Image: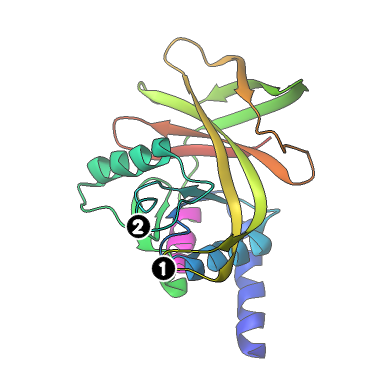
Amino acid sequence: MLFLLTGNTIYSQNISDKKGFALLELYTSEGCSSCPPADDLMGKIQNEYKDSNVYVLAYHVDYWDKQGWKDIFSNADFTKRQYDYAEFMKKSPIYTPQVIINGKADYIGSQETSVRNGIKSAVSKTVLANINLETTQKDTNLLVNYTVEGTSKNSRLFIAVVQKSAKSNVKRGENAHRVLSHYQIVRQLQSVDLNKTKKGTASVHLPKNFNKQDFEIIGFIQDMNSGAILGVKRA
């Protein structure tokens, strides 16, 4: 155990010194019995690299909702996003728990060694685009001022409103009678077309329980021709 902890600490320091980044997009569900280990791994990674260039987004899909338990965080838009990745990567069928790193490679979300190798590979690459984000809350909306550089012809800026953690008491389905821990839950995802302007302000609707301590804002640029993530930044 001591050897593993030491190894992880060194690994974390090496990553933070590199110029690249890793955006981990987890597709998960409270109705999937193989998902909790992946959720826990994402929480572990988020805690390890929360101040570095590794970012975690957990999307709760809705196709498990008819299997006995409706995930309170599920969203049909997130299922569509996962299907879009299947098209980008020419892989089917979709599954949970799936982790996609930088829009280019996918991994079984509970396989820690594979996911960590994917992070190491991702951060060794050069950043292709830069983002600057400034946010101001106005009532139930968040105004996000953005400036981007180095985008491709068909790029979009995605702004994710992320709840850092939550627990759910699951009463039915594959995870019946379990209390599940979730991390980096995407509560809202809004996209901005960057073909017309590289600078502007986007208005994002906030969930009712939004507060600055328990949530964060992550913006990333995606090439909509290939699915590749070009850059990412916390607001």
* Foreground residue among 178 and 80: 178
Q: Amino acid at mark 2?
A: Gln
Instruction: Indicate which disc, 1 or 2, sits on the residue closer to the N terminus.
Output: 2
Q: Is residue 118 magenta?
A: yes
Vertical placement of 154 versus 106: above or below? above
Quadrant of the snapshot with the C terminus: top right
Magenta stretch, residue numbers = 115-123
Q: Does any portion of residue 193 appear in the rendered image? A: yes
- The spot of residue 20 in percent (x, y) is 53, 49
Residue 11, by quadrant, is bottom right
- The spot of residue 19 in percent (x, y) is 57, 49
Residue neighbourhood size for the residue with mark 2, other residues' Cα within 10 Å, grouped as few (<14), some (14–19), many (≥20): few
In screen coordinates, is 16 left or right of 95? right
Vertical placement of 140 versus 81: above or below? above
Which disc, if any, is residue 174? Answer: 1
- The spot of residue 88 in percent (x, y) is 26, 41
Vertical placement of 135 versus 115: above or below? above
* Label 2 SS: loop
Q: Amino acid at mark 1?
A: Glu
Which residue carries the number 2 mark? 67
Identified at 71% across, 26% down, the residue is 134
In screen coordinates, is 152 left or right of 218? left
* Foreground residue among 126 and 11: 11
Which disc, if any, is residue 13? Answer: none
Identified at 67% across, 62% down, the residue is 47
Circles 1 and 2 in contact, beta carbons < 8 Å: yes
* Foreground residue among 190 and 210: 210
Vertical placement of 24 versus 4: above or below? above
